[in-house]
Image (cartoon, grey):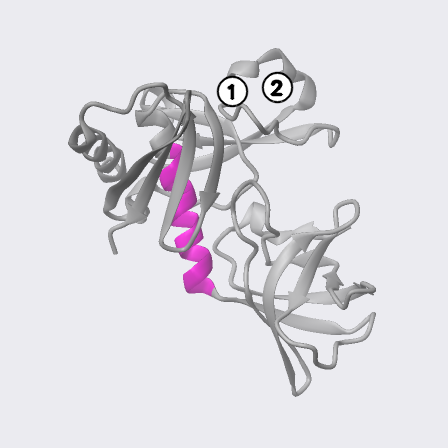
């Protein structure tokens, strides 16, 4: 298995790791990973690893067998050997933008309190698909509500509950099409705001900023009809 360092500290940019496996396809598995693997609508991280005088660019990371995280080289070059220690470095600007967009989508699910049927995250924007028969009447009000939550600079924290606790509280899950992975014994919850200021609590395995103020200005993008009951709402980073 791979220890997901990003789970405990999304701001960690550099860390060592030991190669535990080279996959038949040429992917690299480390004992611990800075790189978030593609999942939950969030792209895998990019960056580089170094060992000795060698440097290898990492195009992305994906989930492997079990709890393994596989780093995918950007080009076919010499790979480190199993047992070697390497230094991992993230493309931090790209990762941080993913963190900002991902947290912004949590806010979008607050100002549009409807079931979510899908979503995607990029470095410039993100989108959620809602079970929304009719388009919102006031786009400006939605955008203002989003930026109000940003300006409140609410803390973003996480907690863990058991699989059984989640099954007993199905209302925590906003996504209609994808259930959080069960079977590990526990599920991570992401909370925005604390105490009486809490505005959101939902299962999520992605990376987020520490406070909503770090997201920066948000712009409401297109609202597209994607079916009789479905509309896609996009949010863009303002800077």
**From what the image shows, is residue 98 above or below residue 228?**
below
Q: Secondary structure at mark 2?
A: helix
Indicate left or right for 82 with 163 as reference: right
Which residue is under mark 1?
172
Q: Looking at the rendered structure, which numbered label has been put on residue 209?
A: none
Q: Position of residue 27 (x, y in %)?
A: 73, 65
User: On the image, which quarter does residue 143 sit in?
Assistant: top left
Residue at the far top in the pictured view: 168
Q: Residue at the spot x=62%, y=11% of the render?
A: 168
Is 215 or 231 nearer to us in this picture?
231
**From what the image shows, is residue 196 above or below residue 88?**
above
Residue stretch in magenta: 92-106
Indicate left or right for 154 with 70 as reference: left
Label 2, residues with CA under 10 Å away: few <14, some 14-19, many ≥20 = many
Q: Position of residue 238 (x, y in %)?
A: 24, 51
Q: Residue at the spot x=34%, y=32% of the render?
A: 108
Can residue 210 be seen at all in this image of the molecule? no
Q: Residue at the spot x=36%, y=18% of the render?
A: 133
Which residue is under mark 2?
166
User: On the image, which quarter does residue 149 sit in?
Assistant: top left
**From what the image shows, is residue 92 above or below residue 177?**
below
* Distance between the alpha carbons at the discs numbered 1 and 2: 7 Å
- The reply to whether dot 1 and dot 2 touch (C-beta < 8 Å) is yes
Q: Position of residue 9 (x, y in %)?
A: 53, 50
Q: Residue at the spot x=50%, y=46% of the render?
A: 207
Residue at the far bottom in the pictured view: 53
Indicate left or right for 54 with 18 as reference: left
Q: Secondary structure at mark 1?
A: helix
Secondary structure mainly formed by the magenta segment: helix
Q: Earlier in the sequence, mark 1 or mark 2?
A: 2
**From what the image shows, is residue 47 above or below residue 34?**
below
Q: Is residue 212 magenta?
A: no
């Amino acid at each position: 298995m791979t220890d997901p360092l990003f789970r405990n500290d999304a701001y960690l940019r550099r860390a060592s790791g030991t190669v535990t496996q080279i996959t038949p396809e040429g992917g690299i598995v480390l004992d611990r990973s800075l790189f978030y693997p593609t999942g939950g609508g969030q792209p895998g991280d990019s960056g580089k690893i170094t060992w000795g005088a060698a440097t290898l660019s990492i195009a992305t990371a994906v989930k492997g067998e079990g709890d393994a995280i596989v780093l995918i080289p950007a080009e076919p070059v010499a790979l480190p050997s199993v047992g070697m220690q390497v230094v991992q470095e993230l493309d931090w600007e790209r990762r941080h933008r993913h963190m900002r967009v991902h947290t912004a989508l949590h806010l979008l699910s607050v100002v549009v309190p409807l079931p979510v049927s899908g979503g995607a995250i990029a470095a410039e924007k993100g989108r959620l698909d809602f079970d929304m028969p009719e388009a919102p009447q006031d786009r400006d009000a939605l955008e203002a509500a989003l930026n109000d939550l940003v300006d409140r600079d609410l803390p973003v924290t996480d907690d863990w509950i058991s699989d059984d606790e989640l099954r007993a509280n199905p209302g925590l899950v906003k996504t209609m099409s994808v259930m959080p992975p069960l079977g590990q014994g526990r599920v991570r919850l992401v909370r925005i705001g604390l105490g009486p200021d809490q505005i959101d609590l939902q299962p999520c395995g992605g990376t987020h900023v520490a406070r909503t103020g770090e997201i920066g200005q948000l712009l409401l993008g297109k609202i597209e009809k994607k079916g009789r009951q479905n509309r896609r709402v996009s949010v863009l980073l303002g800077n």
